Image (tube, rainbow, N blue to C red):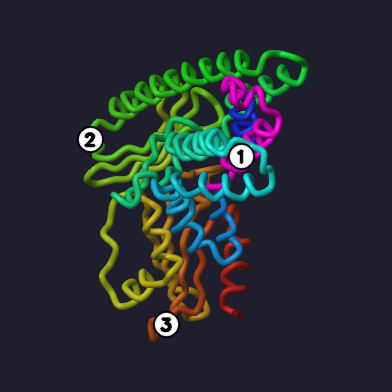
Amino acid sequence: MDSGTHFVMGIALGGLALADPVVANHSMTFTAVMAGTIIGSQAPDVDTVLKLRNNAIYIRHHRGITHSIPAVVLWPILITIVLSLIIQDANVLHLWLWTFLAVAIHVFVDIFNAYGTQAIRPFSRKWVALGVINTFDPIIFTLHCLGILLWAFGANPVWTFSVMYGIIIVYYILRFAVQKAVKRAVHNTIQDEDYVIVAPTMRFFHWRIAAKSKTHYYVGRAYGRTVNIYDKFEIKPLPKTPTVEAAMKDPNLDAFVSFSPLYRWEISELENGLTEVRLIDLRYRSDNRYPFVAVAHLNDANEIITSYTGWIFTEDKLQKKLQIGASN
């Protein structure tokens, strides 16, 4: 989920903590628990700072080790230690318990979007992504904001947030049902697909589709049970040439491949004599473009002159990024 949703979830969980008599009857413990649930709801996303280094490192590691099983154990301990030093009268056990729930819920809900997490690391580095909830879901965010608003105007927070989470659970079940119907509709449309990604959008019945058969890639959208295929690409194996092999060792392309399960490639000769190797993720088609790419420019000696990976929505911006990389 996005940071805003995690923030309001932290507040809601802090309100729900008033169901705990120790928290409800001790103001300092409640203050510490509220701080713990808010911080705990944000802590796993501390790896966002990796963007400051470069996109390749961010793509490879975001929602990785910070969302792993060891991290879920360690985050609450660290947060509890710091908060207990600041708010010394707080009940440490109950502070840890509610902070642990905040961290665990953060990682748990991230599993349900299309980006996914390495939530079962260190047992596996597989990205777990159920793909039923958009990274930002306006219904979930609005329900949390409404619950917080009702609490601010005097509603009982325990009852308010209990009802709210009951509604959200039903909402998740409905999303799974819709996703299943969309996958069935995709099968009826393509029929020979081997692999299908059905990714949610902010609209309840609108889904992105990327699929693969033995011979083609398919990209489209589903509106309810109506599937529209916009692009169809023949699958061609990536050439095993020295140029391609050199390009695929570049950190930007290597990070892209580690993250993207469905992509196609383009190789072209540029006017300046360089060779461009471009990888294009097929999951995120928007306005007739595929904005998530990885590009490398190589010279005749198969040396990387410049490269880039990330989200780029115009070709001009991509070329500017590559020019910046070449000048560094």
Residue matched to label 1: 36
Give the label, 2 or 1, closer to the camera: 1
The answer to whether residue 1 of the structure is visible from this angle is no
Q: Secondary structure at mark 2?
A: loop
Asked if labels 3 and 1 touch by Cβ distance under 8 angstroms, the answer is no
Q: Secondary structure at mark 3?
A: loop
- Quadrant of residue 311 within the rendered picture: bottom right
Quote the CA–CA distance across marks 2 and 3.
Answer: 40 Å
Specify the farthest residue to the right: 153
Q: Kindly identify the amino acid type of the residue bearing the numbered disc 3.
A: Glu
Q: Which residues are the magenta region?
A: 16-44
Location of residue 175 in the rendering, given as x and y in whole percent from the top left corner: 44, 23
Residue matched to label 3: 303
Q: Mark on residue 234?
A: none
Q: Is residue 208 magenta?
A: no
Give the label, 1 or 3, closer to the camera: 1
Q: Is residue 309 above or below residue 12?
A: below
Quote the CA–CA distance across marks 2 and 1.
Answer: 50 Å
Residue drawn at (49%, 44%), measured in percent from left and top? 285
Give the label, 2 or 3, closer to the camera: 3
Q: Secondary structure at mark 1?
A: helix
Our reading of the magenta stretch's main secondary structure is helix
Residue drawn at (67%, 14%), measured in percent from left and top? 156
Residue matched to label 2: 192
Asked if labels 1 and 2 touch by Cβ distance under 8 angstroms, the answer is no
Q: Earlier in the sequence, mark 2 or mark 3?
A: 2
Quote the CA–CA distance across marks 1 and 3.
Answer: 49 Å
Location of residue 91 in the rendering, given as x and y in whole percent from the top left corner: 59, 35
Q: Is residue 41 magenta?
A: yes
Q: Kindly identify the amino acid type of the residue bearing the numbered disc 2.
A: Asp
In the visual, does 223 lie left or right of 143?
Answer: left
Looking at the picture, tell me which residue is in the foreground, 327 or 57: 57
